[in-house]
Each structure stands twice: as C-alpha cells, then as structure tokens.
Image (tube, rainbow, N blue to C red):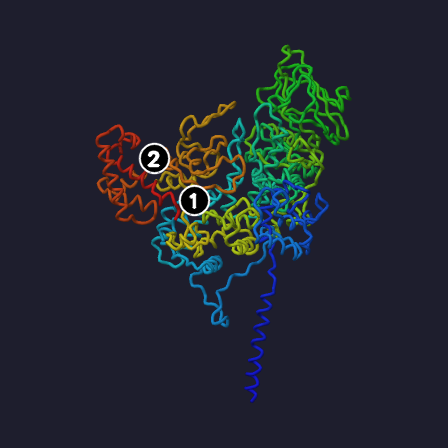
Amino acid sequence: MAVLKFKKTLFILVPVILATIFFFFATRQHIVDFNTEVKPILNKKCITCHGGVKQQADFSVLFRSEALQKTKSSKYAIIPGDPEHSEMIRRINLKDPEERMPYQHPPLSETEITVLTRWIKQGAKWGDHWAYVAVQPTALPKPPKRLLGLLPGKKWDWVKNDIDVFIYDKLLQLKMKPSAEADKPTLLRRASLDIIGMPAPASLSKKFMESNDANAYEELVDSLLASKSFGEKWTSMWLDLARYADTKGYERDDKRSIWKYRDWLINAFNRDKPYDQFLIEQIAGDLLPDATDDQLIATAFHRNTMTNDEGGTDNEEFRTAAVMDRVNTTWQALMGTTFACVQCHSHPYDPFRHDEYYKFMAFFNDTRDEDTFADYPLLRHLTFEDSVKLVNITDWLKENGFRQAAKNVYQFIKTWQPSFNSLQTDSFTNAELNDTKWLAFRNKATARLKRVDLTGKSQLLYRCKSFLPGGVWTIRLDGRNGPVLKTIHVAKTEKDFTIISADLDPATGTHDLYFSYSNPNLKNPDQNGMIFDWFYFTQPLPGKGKPGYDSALNHYRELVAKNLPTTPVMAENPPDMHRSTHVFDRGNWLVKGKEVAPGVPHSLNPLPRNVPPNRLGLAKWLTDKRNPLTARTMVNRVWEQLFGTGLAETLEDLGTQGSEPTHKELMDYLAYQFMHDYHWSTKKMLKQIVMSASYKQDSRASKEGLQKDPYNKYYARGTRLRLSAEQVRDQALAVSGLLSNKMYGPGVMPWQPQGIWMSPYNGSTWKKSDGEDQYRRAVYTYWKRTAPYPSMISFDGVGREVCYSRRIRTNTPLQALVSLNDSVYLEASRHLAFIVEKQTGKEHVREQIGKAYKMTLFKPISGNKLKALEDLYKQALHQFKNDKEKTCKITGMDDEHNNPQTAALVVVMNAILNLDEVVTKS
C-alpha cells in the first residue's frame, strides 16, 4: 500500500518538477557579458566617433564614468536600467539616416540592438578585459563524466603533462583528434632548432638516436637547455624587442659600441636568470644598491634608442623621442600592449587615459642621456689593474671617514657622471653648438649654462679642446656682468679632448653660469678657439695631508683622464638636475600642459608599497605578481617561438583589438606557473612545453585537419614553419662544419656584396672579417639600422629602428635566390661536399648524397629523393666536364677539389641545403 502511495505521489510530482524547471529556464534572462558581447560592438561600430580619439557630442564609450555623463544635447546616452529613456538606444533604432547612429554607416543589426538594449536594462555594467585582470590559478579541464555523470571521466591516455589537458579538451570540443608522435629524427631536429637555434652537435644527436631509454628525449632536452648555444638563440629573439643595433640610427647612422649588452643577454639566458630579475636589471639596474658593471650594462636595453648625430638637429627633440620610445617599447615588448597612441589622446579601445602616458613617461624622463654625440652616459670599462686602483682609492676614502666621497668618486670614474653636457648651454654670442654637439667659442664669445647647484662645489672638471694658446675663460654668476666665479687661462691642448681641473671660489645655491672667452691669437672671426664636451662641478678629493693621499689623488687623476672602451648605460639625474615632466598637448612635445608625477595606469595594479617613484619602482611594478600583463606576454612569446603563432596571435596587442587567445585558460595557467611554481624560470617553462604531447606531434596534416583547422590554431598536429633568418644561416654553417663556436665580442662582418652601405658623413664601410669570425653565428653579425645584413633581411629580419614584437614570415623568390647564390650558402655547400667526399670517397656518389642528407636532417634519405639528387649530380657533372672555368668557380679554385666530380657534388649539396624540409621546421 505504501509503495502504491509513493508511486502515485511521484507520478504527480515529476511533471510539476519538470514544468518548474522548464519555466525557470524559459523565463531566465540571459545576462549580457560586456567583454564578449558589448565591447566588440562598441569597438567596431561606436568608438571611432565616441572614444579616446574623438568624443562627438561629448559622448564617449571608452570608460563607464564618461558614458554615463550628460551629453552635449543635455541628454543621457546611457541610463542604467532604463533603455527606453537612453538616448543611445533611441538613436540606434531610428530610420532617418541623418539622425540614426552610427552616422553615415550601416545600421546595427537587430541582434546588436537587442544586446545593447538588454545590457542597459541589466544596469550597463562594464567589465575588465581578460588581459587586464591579474593572473589567477586556473583549474585543469577534466574528462567528461560517464554513466549520466555518476562516474568520473576516463583518463586521457594521450596527455603527457598539464599543457596537453587544455589542448586535448579543446580538441574534443571541436571533435578533432591529435596526431601521433613524430619520429625521433624529427623530434631531435625540432627540439634542437627551437632550443639552441641550430642542429644539435653530432655527439648529442648520436647519443639520442642510438638510445632506447624511455628518458632519452628528456635527456636531450636537458642537454640542449644546458648548452651555451641556448643563450645565443634566445638572445636573437630578444634583440628585436630591444631594437639592438651596432649603429645609432637616423641619417648618419654612425657606429655604437653596445655589444656588451648583447653578451649580457646571452649570459642571462644561459644562466636562466629569473625573468623578473632579468627585467628589473634592464629597466633599472643602475638604481639597484651597489650596482655591478653587469647590472649597469643590462640597462643598455633602453640605450638602444636611436641618437641623431646630424648637424642642425634639436637635441631636446630627439632626447624626448628616445624617452617616448622607451615608454612604447616597455609596453609593447614587456606587456604586449599598444600604449604608443596614448601619447596623443586616450586609448581608442583600452582603458588608458592621455595623461597616464606622461605619468608613465616621467619614470624615464629623468635620466642623464641627452642625444649626445658621445652617447653619454657611458660605462667606462677599466682594466683589471685599473679596477684595483679604483678599489684602493675608495677603500682609502672609506677608511678615512669619507664614505659619500667614495661613492661619488666611484661613480664618476666609472661613468663621468653626473656632469653637464655642453649642449645644454644657450644664449650664444660668437659661440654655438658646433655641429649641435659641443659648445664652441670664437673670440669674445659668451654663453650660458643654466641652473647649476654650486653648494659645496669647489672644483670644476671639464673636458675640452683648446686650439690656440692665450685664451681666457671667465665664469660669472647670474649675468654677463655678474660676480666672477673663476678666471681660467687656457693653454693649447693636444688633438684629443682633455680633462682639466680648476678650483672654484666658494658659492651656495643654484645659479645660471655665464661664460665668456677671449683670445688675442684668434685673428679669424670665424675660427673656434676652444670647444667643450662636459662640465662636472664637485669637491676636491678629500683627505689632503693624510697618509696615502698623494697616491690616491694621482690614481684618481689617472683613471679620470684615461681613454677607455665604453658602453652606453642608463643613469638617473641627481636631485639638483631633476627634469620635470608635462603632458604634451595632442602629443606635441613643444606644447606642454600640466606637470605630472611618475605613475602607472589606474586600470592596472598599483605601484607596490614602499617602492621609490623612479625606474626601480617601475621595474618592481612591472614584475609584481599582480601585474596582469608581464607573465602573460612572456608566455605568449615563448609559445610563439615554438609553435610559430602565440596563443594570442597578436604578441604586440593583448588588448581588446588584439586576437582573442585560442586557449586563454592555458595562457593563464602557464603565466601563473611561470611566476609562482617556476619562480620566473624561462628554462623550466620551455621544458614543460617541449615535453608535452602537443609539441611532439607529427606535423603531417590530414584532410579533415586542414578543413577544420587549416592554420593549426588548435594544435591537432605539429607545426611546420620556415626557419628564422638566423636559423637558416646558422644551420647551413653548422651542417657544413664551418660554424665557429667563438662567443661574445664586437659584431663581425661576414661576406656581403660591395655597395650595400651608403654612409653619409662618416664614410663607414663594411670590412669583411677574417678567419673564423666570418663563420660565427648570426647573432654576432654587425647590425646597421639603415643597411641591415641583406641575406637576413631577405628572410624577414628587421631593421630595429624601433621595437619589433614579432616578425611576419613571408615566402618570396628572393629568399631562394639568397640561399642558392649567397656566398655563405655556396661556401657551406662546398665545405659539405668536401666533408662527405673525404669520408666516403669520390666514386661513391649515392653514399655522399645520403650522408649529407642525414647530416642535415638526422634521417636516411628516401629512394625517390636520392634518385632526384643523383640525376642532378649527373646533369651537373656533364656540364662541368665541358667547362673548366665553371668548375673552377664552383669549387672555389681549390687545387685539391678542382675537378668536375667535386663541382657536381657542390651543386647537389647546395640543393640539399635548399630543400623545403631543410629550410622548414616540421
């Protein structure tokens, strides 16, 4: 009886419950998501007229606070919860094209109008774009449950690590299957090219290919990560971001000795310097306590900005351009955000206001560099003996109680800072900035140096050239007829600039200094009597009369005056040289608005507590784990280096106008791991990716895979892509045995055709390097901005005038012409032919071809490829037997190898180096 009652109750209740559930879902209103539904409509249809650039009718949809304000017509465009009285909804529904919005554009679709109407009805809530939200722990997708959700899902056998869980889950959603694992030769070559940028050394490849150990691949990866070649490969990637070059840019494009920064990068990558420290040292290494030479060299990251040495240019204009370039590079390279447009107006699409650009610029605007010809400030590289002398001086000062003087002496000897560059002078009479580089005095000349703090400064060191004896230089305070501070009788100097010391009368406060110069020996009114480079106001070396003083003073003078190699570095202004920062009206540096203090955009994480408001504080903010962009950007960049495309394709723009990530959860998962689990270790992140099943897939595409995912955005197969410019060259040299293992040092000049360089003013020429230097890795090739190395430009290398976040790969006939005819590839083909000929004997052509193929791709050649190359050999041999001159040219006029057989083999080797599978990573 009880059972019957239960069944009867159940019979009544089940329809009621089902009806209730149906009614709930039928009447439940969809909650509109701002980022995925509303923001795309606003960006595409509204923001060009109502955003950061334009705010027609005083209406902007960039920020919620602006969108809810009263418009020019005194109406509210958006009234949260009230679409019927919201002017925007009324205007998008009108039929009259003169009143309907968007004006003079196609009307919104019914779906778009519905989305906007419902969004306003629900309160017009804004949302933060995913890239501007701090990275949070991300849960791994789980296999779908079985048996009506009662049993947990079956483990995915294909999965090797957590990366694969995200990839496989997406493939299941798309009803796609991953590919099988690639064969050992393919994995060997793929991992080698990705980790060290060239084929693995013979000993390493042999060990891997002959091993049957289950851990053989992991051991290969560990060996590649430990290789010194690792740093060279990843430095090649970073140099585009750092806009590294061996020249200064602009029209003159004169040389710049900054290669120690490139070497710093190689060592940093090889040592797996934690990425947060890697960035801190590049942004603010000079501001770290007791900064080392290495940390100062790291700051050359932002001294790669261009300097304009052309006469007649405005140094302040190009100093300002360099500072703005540092802002733009910091955002584009390190945070994947297009911040540059904010210098003229609020960002058209992302939540950054106009004045926030200049607050951020203030971090960089207080540095000592001023577009000088010498590229000051410079780190002076002392010899070991000189370094010992410097330590002795500073130790002596500390022992005698002059600790602050020890710091000042150390900084000045190492950098000649903080000094006033002579180009800061103005108010000229019979004087000028000679070629806009140095202060030059003719007879009866005057000039002014503004705002010099003389408190406690009783000595002047200045660097100058004096062309004639008999000159008199007078320094006055605050006017051409002001009190005399110092009169200096100027003797003739040697040809080079000379550093001279002069004692000053005591003075206090900040003054404008007026210089005058006269020389009775100057007969020609247009002739320069002397020119100045810089002025340094300081105190004499303290401790006079104490034991050891004379030795310390002599060493001090010697080190200050010594001519030493240098590297441009960053240095901050002292308080008395502080430079204020103003908003530029519409980005025009000549029209300055309100003054601003250093600050970061309000829409991102705040500056950490207790950090200074300078570049060091900025670097701490940048690497704070709350910063939503830094880790994501690096993860995306590393992924792009391995797979050819980032998880978000637009590496330079993770904002609302950038490409939506194909696997956003995977990006966040890796970014969180990168910061928290890997402690910013790039090598650990790299290893996890290359150990994944996703990375190890075969690259052959099925018909179904091409239809569903032609660009392999969801990774159902391995990636095929053309090698980078550096890899194409390095591979040819490595396979042929020509590659030099020499590391570090100044840029080298391998062969290139005459006439590539057209260097106005300085007459610089390309001088081909001798010996092994011409066969060094591409990362060491001398890089001239106005004429980069031609063969690498043909393979999509970049000029590096500015930061390049990614190279866009092309496929042009010019690339084949380079790899078939360029001297480097011809010489590599010769050397490869000589090697295989020596190892197999001239009569064993098939063996020679097979060996060369295996040396290049780590696997045996197939029968049809062998036949094709053998036929090529026979055709070439027939031609060379009848043409001694061609034979001589193709073999390089080498008596030992000057025969038709070798010449024909060189042609075949050249063909092998040009095979699609050789210039492609698969």
Tell me if 148 is positioned left or right of 878 in this view. Answer: right
> Badge 1: how crowded within 10 Å, few (<14), some, or many (20+)?
many
Q: Which residue of the protein is positioned furthest toward the bottom in this rendering?
A: 1
| Residue identifier under label 2 | 826
Q: Which residue of the protein is positioned furthest toward the front in this rendering?
A: 96
Tell me if 777 is positioned left or right of 305 in this view. Answer: left
Q: Amino acid at mark 1?
A: Gly
Report the quarter where the N terminus lies. Answer: bottom right
Tell me if 502 is positioned left or right of 685 in this view. Answer: right
Q: Position of residue 363 (x, y in %)?
A: 65, 40
On screen, residue 700 above or below 314:
below
| Image point (35%, 43%), residue name | 916
> Badge 2: how crowded within 10 Å, few (<14), some, or many (20+)?
many
Quick one: SS at disc 1?
loop
In the image, 458 versus 464, the foreground residue is 464
- Mark number displayed over residue 376: none
Q: Position of residue 886 (x, y in %)?
A: 27, 30
| Residue identifier under label 1 | 197
Q: Position of residue 183 (x, y in %)?
A: 36, 54
Q: Position of residue 74 (x, y in %)?
A: 73, 45
Q: Amino acid at mark 2?
A: Leu
Nearest to N terminus: mark 2 or mark 1: 1
Q: Could you tell me if residue 578 is visible in this image?
A: no
